[in-house]
């Protein structure tokens, strides 16, 4: 009966359980995090994306790729105003769930604190 209850929880339940496995490869965890963002998070408006780009443009954790596109050096996701599948700025942040996606700024004490949330975007 327990297995029937787990089946009704959906794919995101199983993805989160896979993500929680200690020692899982980073690539697997990053792939799961991206899949959860794409399948469960809402998309933000174009105006919010542009504001997020401004915030990211001043972040020391953001790298500029050879094609002049921004990329988060923490997670590797691209940050652009285009509606690309792996565009970090496209999806609503959800800091109540693990894994979290969105801005992964770390404060000096090591806590994760989204710069987007601090700026209200």
Image (cartoon, rainbow, N blue to C red):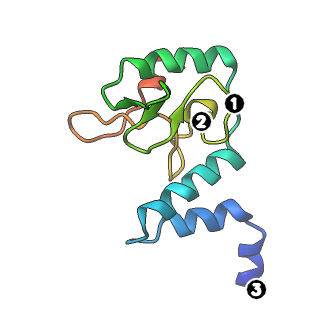
- Indicate whether 105 appears above or below 59: below
Q: Nearer the viewer, residue 64 or 3?
A: 64
Picture coordinates of residue 64 (x, y %)? 40, 28
Label 2's element?
Answer: loop
The residue under label 3 is 1
The residue under label 1 is 83
- Quarter holding the C terminus is top right
Task: Work out how far the residue at label 1 is from the one at label 2, CA to CA, in angstroms.
Answer: 7 Å
Name which of mark 1 and mark 3 comes first in the sequence: 3
Q: Is residue 120 visible?
A: no
What residue is rendered at 71% in x and 74% in y? 6
The residue under label 2 is 87
Label 3's element?
Answer: loop
What residue is rendered at 64% in x and 68% in y? 14
- Within 10 Å of disc 3 (Cα), the crowding (few <14, some 14-19, many 20+) is few
Picture coordinates of residue 12 (x, y %)? 67, 59
């Amino acid at each position: 009966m327990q297995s029937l209850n787990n089946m009704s929880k959906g794919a995101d339940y199983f993805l989160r359980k896979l993500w929680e496995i200690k020692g899982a490869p980073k690539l697997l965890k990053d792939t799961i995090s991206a899949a959860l963002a794409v399948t469960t998070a809402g998309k933000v408006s174009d105006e919010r994306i542009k504001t997020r780009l401004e915030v990211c443009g001043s972040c020391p954790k953001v790298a500029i790729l050879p094609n002049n596109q921004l990329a988060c050096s923490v997670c590797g996701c691209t940050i652009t105003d285009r509606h690309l599948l792996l565009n970090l700025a496209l999806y609503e942040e959800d800091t109540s769930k693990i894994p979290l996606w969105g801005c992964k700024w770390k404060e000096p004490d090591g806590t994760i604190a989204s710069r987007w949330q601090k700026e209200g975007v």
